[in-house]
């Protein structure tokens, strides 16, 4: 019966074995290969509406993919709606509003906003899709200064499981608007999003790299340093075991290093003064801090630009006392034998801790730090990566809020594991909104909640 979909949509439709199928289903995270029964390469909201109605008639579950950065759980069967062709971005400089289609990346938004001196609240990689990132709340590089990405969403066009295209905002279907900002893609398929941009033409930032042997000095220094920072200073500290790949610069290639990530939207001289204590804590291997245009924000974290098979996880931390620092050094310090590529701490607080002006489903405002682990599922130590990530989370659990972040959760487990992204009250409310807009659970792939 799947053959009739071709009669309803003018855009490409793929099935296993078709030329182009593999390219369409493969996302940035190669660890989660999708094998849907059918793929629609959507070229606009009408195609999404038609595909959802058709899938509903078939009783066929649905997933959505733009870039596939968040593809942590393989999709087996069902309908995949690929939105990467829907990548139009338009900017109104007078209102500082951008209208962003479902498949656009943050790189697209930055390119459109830069001529007007405007930028968005992207995460560590601008190659990530705007919509999927923002539905999970969106932890920005400039989060401490400006808050969560979803807080700048002003309206969305969303196709719900009944095949209806709805325009939602704070005043129109507010429960749906609430669930779409921090609840991930549980209640509908966003075809377009209107977001507020910020007047940010350039900033002071980048990375400073230190030899990994200095981690016992740098990690406690970082915790002490972040305690006194103004909220506009946005930072992270990453313990990195870098592979010997040719695209990694020679001073860092194949080394264990500590990376200090910095993003400061204020006066550059003040940024230099604020960073001085960390520069003095150890001798840098490479100091790449300076003034950068907003379009080069990728130079803060320097995430991989090519698809990789990755396993990740995160834990929200209340604090990082001395015993937590010691535990982290045991996990990933100079003497550790770990297969993990990265064990990182991101400083939260600031604007990320304030209540949203329009209520949302984000449940991370009470955390001081985020612990993130990343491992590459390739090479001789690939099989040990998932267990190492789980062991790191268990070891750091005494200082956790008990929750994680939906975008950085990694492979979702059972219902209790998925629920860790939200407080019990928020999780129950999400399930109730899900029950209203998707009672038969068509959108059940990925980090899904069950309808109530």
Image (tube, rainbow, N blue to C red):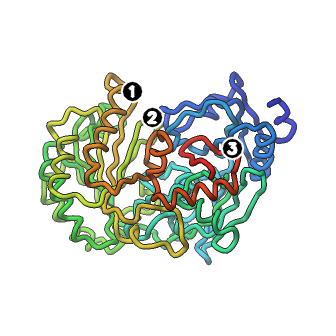
Q: Dot 3 surroundings within 10 Å: few (below 14), some, or many (20 or more)? A: many
Residue 356 is marked as: none
Q: Earlier in the sequence, mark 3 or mark 1?
A: 1
- Which residue is disc 2 drawn over? 308
Q: Quadrant of residue 93?
A: bottom right
Coordinates of residue 269 in the picture (x, y in percent): 26, 73
Q: Is residue 235 visible?
A: no
- Between 232 and 336, the one lying in front of the other is 336
Residue plotted at (38% across, 69% down): 353
Residue under numbered circle 1: 378
Neighbourhood count class around disc 1 (C-alpha, 10 Å): few under 14, some 14–19, many 20 upward:
few
Q: Is residue 83 visible?
A: yes
Q: Around disc 2, counting alpha carbons within 10 Å, would you say few (fewer than 14), some (14 to 19), or many (20 or more)?
A: some
Image location of residue 32, percent across then percent down: 51, 33
> Which residue carries the number 3 mark?
442
Label 3 to label 1, Cα distance in Å?
33 Å
Q: Residue at x 73, y 44 (%)?
A: 42
Q: How many marks?
A: 3
Q: Horizontal and vertical percent for residue 358? A: 55, 73
SS at circle 1: loop
In the picture, residue 142 is in which quadrant? Answer: bottom left
Instruction: Tell whether 126 sits left or right of 245.
Output: right
Q: Residue 295, how many percent across, how many down? A: 47, 59
């Amino acid at each position: 019966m799947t053959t009739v979909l071709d009669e309803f949509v003018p855009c490409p439709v793929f099935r296993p074995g078709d030329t182009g199928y593999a390219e369409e289903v493969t996302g940035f995270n190669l660890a989660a290969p999708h094998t849907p029964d059918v793929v629609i390469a959507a070229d606009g909201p009408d195609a999404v509406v038609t595909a959802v109605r058709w899938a509903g008639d078939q009783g066929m579950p649905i997933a959505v993919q733009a870039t596939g950065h968040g593809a942590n759980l393989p999709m087996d069967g069902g309908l995949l709606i690929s939105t990467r062709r829907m990548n139009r971005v338009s900017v109104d400089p007078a209102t500082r509003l951008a209208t962003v289609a479902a498949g656009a990346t943050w790189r697209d938004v930055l390119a459109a906003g830069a001529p007007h001196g405007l930028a968005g609240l992207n995460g560590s990689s601008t190659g990530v899709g705007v919509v999927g990132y923002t539905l999970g709340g969106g932890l920005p590089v400039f989060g401490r200064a400006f808050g969560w990405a979803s807080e700048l969403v002003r309206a969305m066009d969303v196709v719900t499981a009944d095949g209806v295209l709805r325009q939602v905002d704070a005043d129109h279907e507010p429960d749906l608007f609430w669930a779409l900002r921090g609840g991930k893609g549980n209640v509908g398929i966003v075809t377009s999003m209107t977001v507020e941009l910020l007047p940010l033409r350039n900033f002071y930032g980048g990375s400073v790299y230190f030899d990994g042997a200095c981690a016992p000095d740098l990690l406690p220094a970082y915790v002490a340093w972040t305690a006194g920072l103004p909220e506009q200073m946005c930072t992270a500290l990453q313990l990195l075991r870098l592979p010997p790949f040719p695209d990694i610069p020679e001073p860092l290639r194949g080394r264990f290093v500590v990376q200090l990530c910095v993003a400061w939207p204020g006066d550059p001289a003040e940024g230099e003064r604020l960073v001085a204590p960390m520069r003095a804590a150890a001798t840098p291997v490479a100091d790449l801090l300076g003034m950068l245009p907003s379009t080069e924000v990728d130079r803060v974290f320097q995430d991989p630009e090519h698809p990789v098979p990755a396993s990740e996880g995160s834990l929200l931390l209340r604090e990082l006392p001395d015993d937590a620092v010691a535990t982290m050094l045991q996990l990933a310090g100079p003497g550790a034998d770990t297969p993990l590529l990265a064990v990182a701490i991101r400083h939260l607080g600031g604007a990320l801790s304030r209540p949203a002006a329009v209520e949302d489903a984000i449940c991370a405002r009470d955390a001081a730090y985020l612990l993130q682990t990343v491992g590459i599922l390739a090479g001789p130590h690939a099989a040990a990566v998932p267990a190492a990530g789980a062991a790191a989370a268990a070891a750091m659990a005494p200082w956790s809020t008990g929750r994680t972040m939906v975008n950085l959760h990694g492979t979702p487990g059972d219902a209790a594991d998925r629920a860790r992204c939200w407080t019990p009250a928020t999780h129950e409310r999400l399930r109730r909104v899900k029950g209203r807009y998707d009672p038969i659970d068509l959108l059940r792939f990925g980090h899904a909640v069950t309808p109530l």
